[in-house]
Amino acid sequence: MNQERRAQWLRGVLDLCVLALLSRGESYGYELSQALRAHGLGTVQGGTLYPVLLRLQRSGLLTAHWREGETGPARKYYRISPAGSAALRAAAIDWSAFAASVGAILSEEPKR
């Protein structure tokens, strides 16, 4: 896949993907980055991910707390808030409708 195109698409849905991952349980930045990669979204650098996490936290969609590491430094764990869960539900409905519309356009036969 074209990396520039992937990056452009990812900017539009990264908030939604992060909220969805955190709806499954709390996590920290590196773990989220690995989960995004495992789901086929490629490598999401910290310089991209951490501003998203901070913005979502400041808007009340996430909460965060520091936890001492068992074998390393403390990590900042993020958890979806009730407002984040509501936002995720609404955005998931919007995304499904949007993706279906794009899919319909892309699958139409070209006029000759």
Image: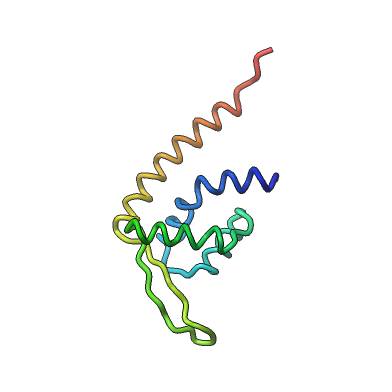
Q: Residue at x 46, y 69 (%)?
A: 27
Q: Quadrant of residue 108?
A: top right
Residue at 44% in and 73% down = 76
Residue 82's image quarter?
Answer: bottom left
| Residue nearest the viewer, comparing 31 with 93 | 31
Scheme by which the image is coloured: rainbow
Residue found at the very far top of the displayed protein = 112
Taking 78 as reference, is 56 above or below it? above
Q: Residue furthest bottom?
A: 71
How many discs mark residues in the rendered view? 0
Q: Which quadrant is home to the C terminus?
A: top right
Which residue occupies 41% across, 66% down?
25
Quadrant of image for the N terminus: top right
Q: Could you tell me residue 73's position as x and y percent?
A: 51, 83
User: Relative to 9, does residue 84 appear above or below in the rendering?
Assistant: below
Q: Quadrant of residue 54?
A: bottom left
Residue 61 picture location, percent across and down: 35, 57
**Place of residue 57 in the rendered image (x, y in percent of width and height, measured from the top left):** 37, 61
Task: Tell me which residue sits at (60%, 29%) in the image.
Answer: 106
Rendering coords of residue 67 (x, y %): 42, 80
